[in-house]
Amino acid sequence: MIIDVHAHVFARPILAKPNGRTFLSVEDQIRRMDEKGVDMAVILPLNSADGPAERQSMGEILNICDAFPGRFIPYCEIDPRRHDWHTVEHFYTGLSQYKDAGFKGFGELTARLPFDDPKMMSLFGALEKLGLPVTFHTSLPEKQTYGVIDTLGLPRFEKVLQTYSDLVFFGHSASFWSEISGDLTAETKEGYPKGPVVEGGTVVRLLREYPQLNGDISAGSGFNALTRDPEFSWPFIDEFQDRLLLGLDHTDVELDFQHIEWLSQARDDGNISADALEKILWKNANRLIGLGLDA
């Protein structure tokens, strides 16, 4: 069993990215899943005004899931800046309707608001009450891009972790995974730093101190964090084998991330255990998203 916790899937993608390619159609996604041996994928809509993709209705997400039963897991997502939702109760009332419709989580959260903005705190409070995990993308305030705003060391995110101890978070993005090393600077935070991982990284500390935080290892950012320093990677994977989740994040047909192949080779070489691999490939997602699947 393999579950990809990070996919963006469209019934009929139209708007091209700057590289001239669209996000994946459902047919493209199924084809790539079959090539990789992926059984199920979480669909993450990108509905904030800052998101890099076309907006999707939650009905489109459910229609895709219904058309390919057993292949997709639906997440909901809204822009928390909508004018009529302010309090935890506002967000709870709206998001509970999505949960009742079958949505299993929230994300990908990309809104350009600080983590501890009042709107964000109301959103997190509602998600905690609903028991819905949230996948987020973070970035620096000075960048003209998408992603929840935080600075070096993720102090605003840590405030959220301290406040919502029962809300399950899946951390993602270059600005998150670069924080794995203690020598990070603001200049390198948004990239894919190379070389040895230095002790004292914020992500390692947060994983140790806040059990509700988990790592979505998708895209080049997560893959770089795991592969840049093998001497660091194997103990890291062993320590957090219950907290890391496979994600791929194929945003167009030309991408071909090698997470599954790399992890499988690491097991074959004896660098990670078979149990750790199974947890990362699907068991952690099954438990944290509440899928109730058997092997």
Image: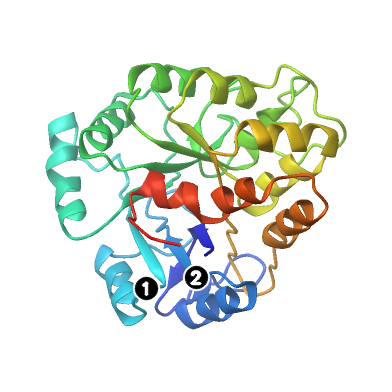
Amino acid found under the numbered disc labelled 2 = Asp
Q: What percent of the width, then of the height, locates residue 294?
A: 40, 61
In the rendered view, tell whether residue 257 sits above or below residue 230. below
Q: Is residue 246 visible?
A: no
- Judging depth in this view, the residue of 162 and 145 nearest the camera is 162
Q: At x 43% / y 36%, what residue is drawn? A: 169
Compute the Cα span from label 1 to label 2.
8 Å
Relative placement, left or right, of 22 versus 263 is left
Q: Disc 1 marks which amino acid?
A: Gly
Residue at image coords 39%, 42%: 134
Residue under numbered circle 1? 70
Which residue occupies 21% across, 33% down? 129
Label 2 sits on residue: 39
In the image: residue 48, left or right of residue 147: left
Determine whether label 1 and label 2 are within 8 Å by CB. yes
The residue carrying pointer 2 sits among few (fewer than 14), some (14 to 19) or many (20 or more) residues within 10 Å by Cα, namely: some
Percent coordinates x, y for residue 45 in the rendering: 40, 58
Vertical arrangement, residue 44 with respect to residue 115, above or below: below
* Frontmost residue, 204 versus 61: 204
Which residue is drawn at the image coordinates 29% and 24% (left, top)? 118
**SS for dot 1:** loop
Instruction: In the rendered view, tell whether residue 280 sits above or below residue 164.
Output: below
Image-quadrant location for residue 112: top left
**Depth check: 101 or 210 in front?**
210
User: Along the horizontal axis of the image, is 205 left or right of 4?
Assistant: right
